[in-house]
Amino acid sequence: MKFREKILCPDLTEAAYPGNIGFEEMVKFYKLASEEELETMEKVIDKNDWEKFKELIKKVIETELQ
């Protein structure tokens, strides 16, 4: 099972704090991203690349994570 299949949920709320992975943003990302962006995100998650993760989130949903 891919990561995106594990996180898609209808309603989520979360606390904001430095280092937060942005769960709500991930859900939005997986709903809006192209197939290419989804594949890239899977690779980014596998590599644990926080900077690229934040770049992809910002590019697709226009939200900047801390």
Image (tube, helix red, strand yellow):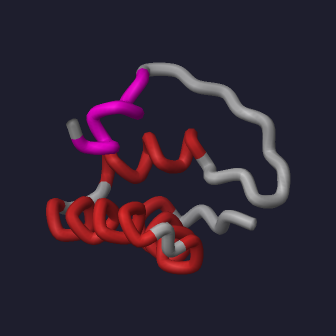
Residue 18, percent from left and from top? 83, 58
Residue 58, percent from left and from top? 53, 70
User: Which of the image's four quarters has the N terminus?
Assistant: top left
User: Along the horizontal axis of the image, is 8 left or right of 24?
Assistant: left
Residue sticking out furthest to the top: 10
Q: Nearer the viewer, residue 3 or 57?
A: 3
Which residue is at 32% across, 52% downward? Answer: 32
Judge whether residue 59 is colored magenta. no
User: Along the horizontal axis of the image, is 17 left or right of 59?
Assistant: right
Residue sticking out furthest to the right: 17
Residue 30, percent from left and from top? 34, 48
Which residue is at 54% across, 48% downward? Answer: 25
Residue sticking out furthest to the left: 35
Which residue is at 43% across, 21% downward? Answer: 10
Above or below 1: residue 49: below
* Quarter of the rendering containing residue 45: bottom left
User: Along the horizontal axis of the image, is 57 left or right of 65?
Assistant: left
User: Along the horizontal axis of the image, is 42 left or right of 49?
Assistant: left
User: Which of the image's four quarters has the C terminus?
Assistant: bottom right
Above or below 59: residue 8: above
Q: Nearer the viewer, residue 41 or 62?
A: 41
Highlighted magenta segment, given as a residue range:
2-9
Disc count in the image?
0
Give the prevailing secondary structure in the magenta stretch. helix
Which residue is at 52% across, 21% downward? Answer: 11
Above or below 36: residue 35: above
